Image (spheres, grey):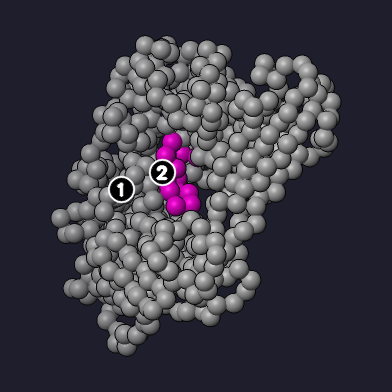
Amino acid sequence: MSRSVLSFCLLIYSGFVSAQLFQTPSYPLKQFRNPLDIPISLAANFGEIRLNHYHMGLDIRTEHRENLPVYAAADGYIYRIKIEPFGFGQAIYIRHTNGFVSLYAHLNSFYPALASYVKQKQYELESWDISLELPPDLLKVKKGELIAYSGNMGGSQGPHLHFEIRTYPDDTNLNPMLFGLPITDNTSPVIRSLSAYDLNKSFYEQTPLIIQVKGNSGRYTISRQIFILNTSNPGFGISGYDTQLGSKNPNGIFQAIIYDNGLAVSGFRMDQISYNDTRGINAHIDYPTHQRGGPYYQLIFKMPGYSHSIYREAKTGGRLHLEDGKLHEIRIELKDPYGNSSNLEFKVRYQPEKKENPVFPGKIFYPGMLDGFETPDAAFYLGEKCLYDSVHLVYQEIPLEGRDIVSSMHHFGTNQIPLADTMTVRIKLLIPVNQQQRILMQRIDGEESEVKKPEWLGDWATASFWSFGNFRLVLDTIPPVISIPGVLQNANLQKSSRIVILVEDNNKKIKNFRCTLDGKWLMFTNDKAKAFIYHFDENCKPGNHELKIYAEDEAGNSATKILPFVR
């Protein structure tokens, strides 16, 4: 058989084996257009790794500029508007006649008719941050029609357009790169290094083997001729990225499959993810290694507690079986949505090694179980969906100390173990106080801190948290501080374009903010929660005015400031 015929046969066989794990989705390829009028260049792709979530769409570059026209990707109607300090900032949702939904986020402004409608609703609801559902016949749009202008609002680190395609009504995000958008790409994914784990042990109670990878242009290997493993049940992860033609930006990996002697064992594909399941990214990566400052290793095996996953497994259960002690040829194939691929090939063999099993302190917890840990002054409860793998969790009580501290510090778990669901924390109040309603539960992890208003049952406070750490009760009686930089009492603001208000709190959590102008609610924006800003408009006519500002923190402490001014 000639080399060309052999290569063709292997290609067909490889495609057949891949299809055993993943079916090619059937999406319309010509119905969505580029939402901008400049060529698509990606700052981030679908499924890219983020803190506690997958990236759920495409980040399209806007050439470092704001206020580029944004166009409807297909015919439909605007059915939802969302405005918030973080997250999407200002976003438009369009429901299309083809049954899908497109989303456009981090917008600076909407087109005039929509902007007028939204502003009217904000004043009716007396709220800047809103989520509106619109009727089908109110704001219809055609493919290519102007709907907004791009920006940098919300959880954005620079000007760009965040674009998503979703199903309706179940709201599952689909990979927009599978819809035939005009994105040119003939570059293969890049593989940096390999990580290896013993799946007979808890994922969180071992240190992975890190193996450097060499190669380029889609062909990679490791420096060892034969990789000897002392576990018959290994799992592997890869550190790498994908690129787009003409860009060096490291984007996420679309698909990875691991093969054992030519047979597909397990793999993942970034084709559809729900926001309800996006936190599962912490079971897709080597979370402890990244927490210690290492790179993201994407696992090519499914963790036990990852209930809704991006993984597919072969009939072998998604595991490599090396019990036979023979040489196994391993291939890890990475692919992008356009079929560009890279392969990492190496040989492994199982060689048993006598080792004493280490004894870990703390109580062991398992995924899928409702369990807890109780002491006379604290309790921690983990639900069925809290853990991705079994792990021993250590508890320690640190004596009460410090001003306005009204309980001991209770340490439970570590920040190197992610939670898939919230953990319930109960702490007993040790010092009687007159203002129990001003007590907050505080979680501390290094320099990070967060507070929550607990529920009370006698002397016990209860709250839920997304992370392990150190927990205690604190008394907060300090009201927020309101300031208006550069503006004095009775100031003449005829030449000013806006008013900026800063609100600071000792626990950095403002629960309520409200401003009235001459007794009527006045809308202040709060992009990225840095400042509250009012841009002078028709709601502030010439003459004398009184601005009343109210701010309230999480504990219920409030402050009021009155500013008389002339316009």
Give me the residue at 52% from left, 12% from top.
113
State the residue position of label 1. 310
Q: Nearer the viewer, residue 467 or 355?
A: 467
Amino acid type of the residue that numbered disc 1 sits on in the rendered structure: Ile
The image shows residue 215 at horizontal and vertical percentages of 47, 55
Q: Which structural element holds mark 2? A: loop
The image shows residue 285 at horizontal and vertical percentages of 40, 57
Q: Is residue 40 left or right of residue 180?
A: right
Q: Residues within 10 Å of mark 2 (few under 14, many from 20)?
A: many
The image shows residue 556 at horizontal and vertical percentages of 56, 51
Q: Which structural element holds mark 1? A: loop
- The majority secondary structure of the magenta stretch comes to loop
Q: Residues within 10 Å of mark 1 (few under 14, many from 20)?
A: many
Disc on the earlier residue, 2 or 1? 2
Whole-Å distance between the Cαs marked 2 and 1?
Answer: 10 Å
State the residue position of label 2. 47
How many marks can you see?
A: 2
The image shows residue 416 at horizontal and vertical percentages of 45, 67
